[in-house]
Image (cartoon, helix red, strand yellow):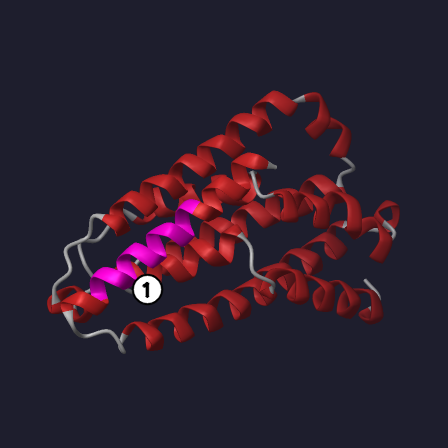
Amino acid sequence: MEPAGLILFSSALFIAAASPGPGIAAIVARVLGRGSKGAVALSAGIVLGDLVWLTFAVLGLAALAQTFHGVFLAVKYAGAAYLLYLAYKLWTAPATARNVIAEGKAEHPAKLLLGGLALTLGNPKAIVFYLALLPTFLDLTRITILGYLELALATMAVLSVVFGLYIVLAARARRLFTKPGAIRILNRVTGTVMAGAAAAVAAR
């Protein structure tokens, strides 16, 4: 690919990824409520979902997504249900000082990865960016296998930077809460944010 096109794509993706959305809300709420352990697996699932949409856009499968609308609708609601599950776990988490210092009971990375994948596949912002906006930045009919690999690597690099920054900032903010009352409020707020993200995914 031409460097200018790759830079334009990466810049647009960075802006889109950094803007608040269900994915960012899920990552931040999880780190604030449960600690940073597991955040990487959740983020990896979200990145994987973005790569799926990127592949669809490059291969010209937007029509296929419309044909199998019911499948993608089911995936969207699965992602929303997972966010609601996380919201419940945060809302009911014990408000103890140990909850802040410890990372909490670990969840299986595969479960978090699949949750992040389902979330992205049902995220309207990701769908719009890759299936509608990407063709305005690049001539998808001229992308080679090497060009696709460059786009995929750029996507993983940009999203890793964005999600990494959010994880670090959320982890630092979490350390400010050391009293049970503050922890309870934090758990309830992050649980509400997670539930709101679920509602946003399901409603679109």
Marker count (numbered):
1
Q: Is residue 202 left or right of residue 99?
A: right
SS type, badge 1 = helix
- Residue 191, horizontal then vertical, whole percent: 33, 51
Q: Is residue 184 magenta?
A: yes
Label 1 Cα neighbours within 10 Å, binned few <14 / some 14-19 / many ≥20: many
- Residue 133, horizontal then vertical, whole percent: 79, 50
Vertical placement of residue 203 versus 5, above or below: above
| Residue that carries the numbered disc 1 in the rendered image | 32
At horizontal 19% and vertical 52% (from top left) the residue drawn is 93
Pick the residue in front: 152 or 103: 103
At horizontal 54% and vertical 40% (from top left) the residue drawn is 201
Vertical placement of residue 75 versus 120, above or below: above
At horizontal 37% and vertical 40% (from top left) the residue drawn is 84
- Residue 26, horizontal then vertical, whole percent: 43, 53
**Main structural element of the magenta stretch: helix, strand or loop?**
helix
Region in magenta: 183-195
